[in-house]
Image (tube, rainbow, N blue to C red):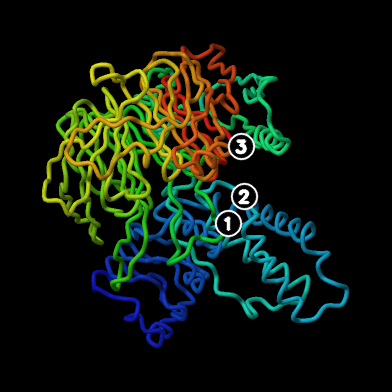
Amino acid sequence: SLSKLQLKTGDLDPRLFSRLRHLQKLDLSDNLLDKFPNSLTLPDLRVLNCNNNKLEDVTALKQFPLLEELTYENNVYLTLNDDYKVMFLLQNLRLLNGKDITKLANHVRRVNSRKLTSKVTAHWEKFFRDQLPEKYTAEQVKAIRKKFLKSVQTNVVYGPSSLSEFTRWRVKMIAEEFLACSLGVELNSDTEPEEKTDENEEESTESPREAAEDVAQVGDFSSYISNVTVTPSKRKRNHSKSSPGNKRSKTQANTEEETAEDVSAEPLHFLQCHSKGNSREDFKTQLWSCVFEPVLDSGARKDPIVSSSRTVATCGGESVCLIDCETGTVLKKYKVATEEFFSVAWTTLTMVISDSRKKAHNILAAAGRRGIVKLIHVAADFCYGEIKAHKKPIATVCFSPTQETHLFTASYDKRIALWDIGIPDCDYNFKASQLLVLETASIPLRIALVPTCPEQYLLAGCEDGCFAWNIKLDKGQKSRPFEAIFQFPGEESLTTSHRVDGLAFLNDDVIVSKSSKPGCIYLWSWSRSFDAKGKGCQRTMSAVILAELEWSTTDMSYLTLSTCPAKEYVFCGDEKGSVWMYNLSSYTSAWGSSPKGKRSERRISPTQILPWPELRVNGEQPPEILVNNVVADPAFTYLVVLTSVNITAIWKKC
C-alpha cells in the first residue's frame, strides 16, 4: 500500500518497481499521479487501485498484462473512452471500478474489433488500393500511409459518439496493423504524433446500454417512447416558387432548386426523456431549451477530425438531458425534483489541472423556476455548484462569447443580471460575483448579445417589446435602465408594443425577432436601427425592417425561433408540430450591399415546412403538439425539436 503519500508520477521509480517481480496487489489511491511511467514492469500484478488521483491516460496500463481487478474512480479526467481502452488492452481484466465487465469486454475485444477491421479494410479497398502502383517506392508508401491514417480516422464511424475517441484510437491501431500486413510497413515507423484530442465531454460513467439498464431500475432514464408507429408523410413542401410576374435569373432558379433539395430532412428519433417520475404516460411536461455542446479546442487549434458536435443538452420539467443526436442515446440526465428547468447554456472553461497545467472543459449552466443556476461539469458527471441568482424564475440564460466566465440571467423579477461564475479549482471551489444588473420594464423572455460588440450591447425580447442596454463594464453604474426600445410597424407608442418571444442574430448585423402579433417574424438591421451616437437613456428607435417572414397565423405565444448563421437559416415551430425553415442566403447579400438596406417587398415564404409525422403512441396520437423550440447544430446536420407534450424529435438532414 502506497496510499495517501502525495506521490507524483516522478516518484514511481522504475528501477525500484522493476525489482518487485512477484507483487500482485498495489494500492496507489489518494495520490497526485497524472500518468503511469511506461516501464514499471510488474509482471505478476493482478489488483491495482488508483482511486482519487489525477490520471489523464490509461494506455500505459497495458504493461500489466495479468491485471484482473482495476479501480480508478474519482480521476476526473478519465472518461468512458478510457474504460473501453483498458477493456481492450487488458485481456484478463474482470472487474473495473467494482463492476464485472467480462461480457462487455469480450464484445469490445471481438465484435467491436471485427466490425472496425471490416470498415477499415473496406475504406482501403474503396478509396486507396488503386492509388498505389504495382511497383511502389518507400516514399510513395509513406505518403499514402499518412493520407490513409488521416482519412480512415475521419470517416470510419461506429457506435455512439460518446465513444468517438476510443473508436478513432482503435481505428488508427487497426489501420496501422493492416498496412503492416498488406504493404510491409513497420508499425509506428515515421509515425506522425497522434492527434490527441481533449476528452469527449459527452461521456457517461457507464456504457450507454449499462447505464440504461442500471438507471432504469432507479428511475433516472426514460428512453425511447414505447410502441411508437411513425407513418411517413410527404416531407417537402416548397413554398419558394415564384409567381408568373416574378422574374428570376437562371442562376437564382438553380440556386433555389438546389437549396430545396439540400434541405431535405427525415425524422430520426422521438424521445420521451423528461418525464416526471419517469412516467411513460407523461405527455404534459413542456420542453423549453436546447443547445448543442461546443467542440473543444485542442490547444490552439480545433480538433481536425470532429467538425461539429452531435451532443445536445435539452431541458424541461425537473430534468436536463444530454442526447447523442445520431444514436438517440440519452448519455446523461440530471434531475432536481423541485425544479422546472427553462434554459440551458454552454461555456468552455480553461481549468488548472495537476502541475499547474491547463485544460479546456465544457461546463453546462441550467436554470428555471427556482431562480437558481446549476453549474455542471459534464465530463466529471458532477454538478459542482449553484448560484442563487434571482428570487423569481429565470426565463433564459446565455454566456458571453468573448468572456467565458460571464453569464447573463434574465428573470421574471424584471432584471437581467451579469455574473462572473469564476473558474473552479481542482477541488471545485469557485467564487461567483454579480457584475451588473439591467432593469427591464417587463419580463425578459429572450436575450442576445450583439455579435460585433458582445461586450458592449445586449438585446432582450420582453413582454412589451424589444430593448437594448449598454453593458460595458468600464462604466461605473452597476444598475442600468435600458438605453433604447425598438419600435416596429404598427406600434405607434409603448402602449401598442407587442410581446417579443423570439430573438436571434442571423449574422453580424441582421436580427430576427418574433412578436405576439399573429404571423409576424421580422428581419431588421442592428447597425441601421441603433443610434450609438445619441445621448440619454430610454430612447425610442425605429427598427429598420429588411424583410418579413411568412409564418403561422396563430396568436399563441412563446413558440420561439432560432438561427443557423453558418448556413443562413431561420427556424421556427408552430402550433401544429410543424417546423418552418427559411434559407435566406440569397437575400443577405442584397441587404448588406445597400447602404440603406433593401427591404423585400413581399413576405418571404419558407423554403420548406417539415410537418409533424403521424406519430402514434400505444396506438393513439399525442394531444395537440406545440413546437416550443427548434435548434440546429452549427453545421445544420441535425434539427432538434422540443414540444409541449414531452417529446423531443430529432431530424437529420439527408
Badge 3 density bin: few <14, some 14–19, many ≥20, Cα 10 Å: some
Relative height, residue 316 to residue 24 (above, below): above
- Of the 4 image quadrants, the one containing the N terminus is bottom left
**CA separation in Å, label 2 and label 1:** 7 Å
Q: Which mark is residue 583?
A: none
Residue identifier under label 2: 158
**CA separation in Å, label 1 and label 3:** 24 Å
Is 482 left or right of 588, judged from the image as shown?
Answer: left
- Asked if the residue at tag 1 contacts the one at tag 2, i.e. Cβ–Cβ closer than 8 Å, the answer is yes
Rendered image quadrant of residue 372: top left
Residue identifier under label 1: 167
Q: Residue at x 19, y 31 (%)?
A: 440
Foreground of the two, 122 or 254: 254
Counting residues from the start of the chain, the first of labels 2 and 3 encountered is 2
Element on which disc 1 rests: helix
Element on which disc 2 rests: loop
Relative height, residue 552 to residue 59 (above, below): above
Residue identifier under label 3: 653
Residue that sits furthest to the bottom in the current view: 15
Is 476 left or right of 235, judged from the image as shown?
Answer: left
Amino acid type shown at disc 3: Lys
Counting residues from the start of the chain, the first of labels 1 and 3 encountered is 1
The location of residue 44, given as percent across then percent down, is 47, 74
Tag in front: 1 or 3: 3
Foreground of the two, 478 or 343: 478
Element on which disc 3 rests: strand
Badge 2 density bin: few <14, some 14–19, many ≥20, Cα 10 Å: some
The location of residue 226, given as percent across then percent down, is 53, 23
